[in-house]
Amino acid sequence: MSNLRYRISSFIVIFCIVLAQTSHALPLKTEILNDKEQPVAKVLVYIDFVEILDMSDNLQGKVGIFNNQGNLELFIVKEDNLKSVVGRAFDRKLYDANDQLVGYYDWSTFWVYAYSPTGKKLGQAKCIAFRGVCAAGVATYLTELLTKPLVTPGGTPNIAQPETIQDGGVTLE
């Protein structure tokens, strides 16, 4: 009987060690669903940013929190050679690089939602944590902000160059 207890307890200990070595809490992975509830992209959710991937797991962009003179804002960065800042999110609204409203986002206990400027639902994703940044990432993808060309109102390309913003010793490049 004690030999059986030893074997069972040894198995449980080894199982727990293997599980602890192979499981990681972050990132949380979820799929972005369009308005027909079909998967169209993926989001990897971390504490203060999300990575947006297409269905082939190619990185499309990131949405991250930045403290701008005491105001928390979400900046949207396209995954290109320049790491172009293509927009920002604030107060459940999504803006492009020219500060034009491109969409809204919201969340409930388990779901996040994206809407067009006219209020049409674009899609949703299941996010159980960090819902604000997750919702902004979902809205970023569904409003096609990462695929739109960067253009100023005058018609010339507005490719955002990395700039240094200093706030309490934090530098964004």
Image (cartoon, helix red, strand yellow):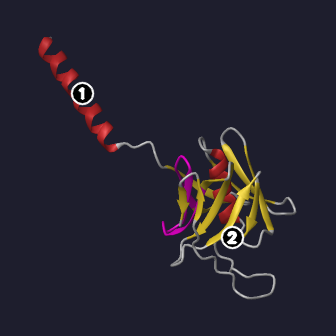
- The residue at the point 72 percent across, 52 percent down is 113
Front residue (pair 77, 146): 77
Say whether residue 60 is magenta.
Answer: yes
**In the image, is residue 167 above or below residue 24?**
below
Please state which amino acid type lies under the numbered disc 2: Leu
Please state which amino acid type lies under the numbered disc 1: Val
State the residue lying farthest toward the right. 118
What is the x, y in percent for residue 119?
85, 58
Secondary element under disc 2, as helix, strand or loop, is loop
Say whether residue 3 is magenta.
Answer: no
Point out the stretch of residues depicted in magenta.
Answer: 42-64
Q: Is residue 161 left or right of residue 11?
A: right
> Which residue in the structure is indicated by mark 2?
145
Front residue (pair 71, 127): 71
Front residue (pair 130, 21): 130
Q: Residue 106 got which mark?
A: none
Say few, some or many: other residues with alpha carbon within 10 Å of mark 2 (under 14 / 14 to 19 / 20 or more). Answer: many
> Which residue in the structure is indicated by mark 1?
13
Task: Tell me if I can see residue 38 in this picture.
Answer: no
Q: Earlier in the sequence, mark 2 or mark 1?
A: 1
What is the x, y in percent for residue 128?
60, 41
